[in-house]
Amino acid sequence: MRCFRCVNEIVELPSNDPARVSEHYVYSPAFVVEVLPGGPGGASGECRATVLCWSCMHEVRPDMWLSEEGWDADKPGVPFSQLPIYDHDTDNADEPSTYRDIEVKPRE
Ligand SMILES: [Zn+2]
């Protein structure tokens, strides 16, 4: 799947794949981060989920979550309005693979 921000391909390995913990650690894991709707102060609405690659995760340095404004400011591959809903009631909301069907277009 692709990173929702930089749109680079994220190669995921099964958690039991030894390559994931080897010294040749070339595969970027993916991270799910919540994006909260509204500007400063927040607004009511549903949280969205975004999938970030390792590199974006470190560039953005989210403090548990990101704001809609902050997210869109970086002109991500998937704008806030197209991010999937983050469903707090499901067990797999934090699994990147939950969002693998989201279309990620190249950045302009
Ligand atoms: Zn990225």
Image (spheres, rainbow, N blue to C red):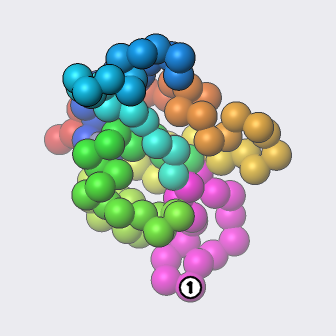
Find residue 15 and report its horizontal and vertical position in percent: 53, 22
Examine the rendering and report whether any part of residue 19 can be seen.
Answer: yes
The residue under label 1 is which amino acid type? Gly
Ligand 1 sits in which quadrant? top left
- As drawn, the residue found furthest toward the right would be 89
Residue occupying the point 49% across, 77% down: 39
92 shown above or below 16: below
Residue that badge 1 annotates: 41
- As drawn, the residue found furthest toward the front would be 23
Which portion, as a residue range, is magenta? Answer: 34-48
Mark 1 is surrounded, within 10 Å at the Cα level, by few (under 14), some (14 to 19) or many (20 or more) other residues, namely few
Find residue 101 and report its horizontal and vertical position in percent: 53, 22
Residue occupying the point 47% across, 69% down: 63
Find residue 21 and report its horizontal and vertical position in percent: 38, 27
37 shown above or below 3: below
Residue occupying the point 40% across, 49% down: 79
